[in-house]
Image (cartoon, rainbow, N blue to C red):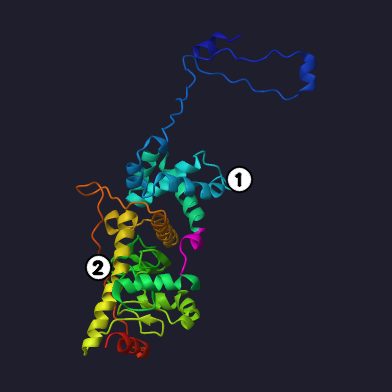
Amino acid sequence: MLTNAARRRGLRPPTATVCHASALTSHPTVTLLRHRPLGLARRRRNPPVYRPLVDLSTMEERHIILRYRLDRATIHELCAQLEPALMSPIRQPTGIPPLVQVLSVLHFLASGSFQTTVAMSSGMSQPMFCKILSRVLSALTKYMRSYIVFPEEGDLVTVKGDFYALGHIPNIIGAIDAIDGTHVALVPPKDDEQVYRNRKNYHSMNVQVVCLADQYISHVNAKFPGSVHDAYVMRNSSIPYVMEQLQRHRVWLIGDSGYPNLPWLLTPVRNPRTRAEERYNEAHGRSRRIIERTFGVLKARFRCLHMTGGSLMYSPKKVCQIIVACCMLHNLALRRQVPFLLEDGPDGGVVAAVEPVESEEEEDDGDDTDNRDTVIQQYFQ
């Protein structure tokens, strides 16, 4: 019972279970009684709100391609491949189905939107999408060697024939260049800000790509900052070793004037003096345009790589993962013959204009022009 003074202070009678003496002796620990002020109701939690997750089964095929850049069958195949990594018991479970995780990341790469926008359209919170982005990128890039493959010896005849149809230069197996005029922009780390500033005075990653005649990306190197020269990126990649192993087949790559002349790399003649050199430069330009078209299609298909999508606000390591993932998905779309559709344009799907790739001047450091002179004399006299 409460006294009158206790009642005036607003105290309520304590609630407790009556214990017998025998129970108190066996359980000496006694719980303190708590008093709740009169008139103070217990707080009720709001019921949880579950946002509707994206449903692929209710979408039309054309809308799927416009939004995710892959068709329905290819998305399900990709999801089946990544599902073991996305549902790994080692990682903390997210409660989001693997299909929704893959769709949200595909939407992010294709649109270049902010995480909040992509998360809302996918039915999840922004912090949850941030975790899913890292998880899907890590799972996808583990299969890089399955999606980005350099031509093997058995494929050289077909690859050389496809390039010969472009510019009538024999024995070409790839066009090499870096995303130079359109570097992949990013927000640089504060400690190394000057390292990522390119010659056009903005921060970026310098990405080296080798492509085939059908725009298939056979090599990508995205680990160097924007201030690094294209030739340095090439020298510190696996391309020199791979091409030296293929030299017994007498095959070449073609590159712009930013690269040195090597026994396996053909560059244009800077100051042509003869008609044969002019014809060689014309054929070289026709063959090398494929790399510019590849860059245009890659950045139009995945707007996160384009300047119109803004700078990627991630660490350089994650930006490298994003670039490699886009190249892998680009090859996947080509191999599965997914139509290239964009949301802009009168027909709802047009190919964006290709941005020219500007070359950097390479210093003369003992270029080997004998191989190029031999090609000019044999095929363009």
Q: For this view, does 129 lie left or right of residue 36?
A: left
Local crowd at mark 1 within 10 Å, few (<14), some, or many (≥20)?
Answer: few
Kindly state the secondary structure of the residue where label 1 is placed: loop
| Furthest residue in direction left, as rendered | 346
Question: Dot 1 corresponds to which residue?
Answer: 89
Cβ atoms at labels 2 and 1 below 8 Å apart? no
Q: Where is residue 19 in the image (x, y as percent from the top left)?
A: 73, 14
Quarter of the figure that contains the N terminus: top right
Identify the mark at residue 356; answer none if there is no mark: 2
Q: What residue type is labelled 2?
A: Pro
Q: Where is residue 70 in the image (x, y as percent from the top left)?
A: 39, 49
Residue that appears at 55% across and 50% down? 85
Question: Start and end of the magenta stretch?
Answer: 142-151
Magenta span includes 53: no
Local crowd at mark 2 within 10 Å, few (<14), some, or many (≥20)?
Answer: some
Mark sitting earlier along the chain (2/1): 1
Residue 69 appears in the figure: yes
Q: In this view, does 350 lie above or below 215?
A: above
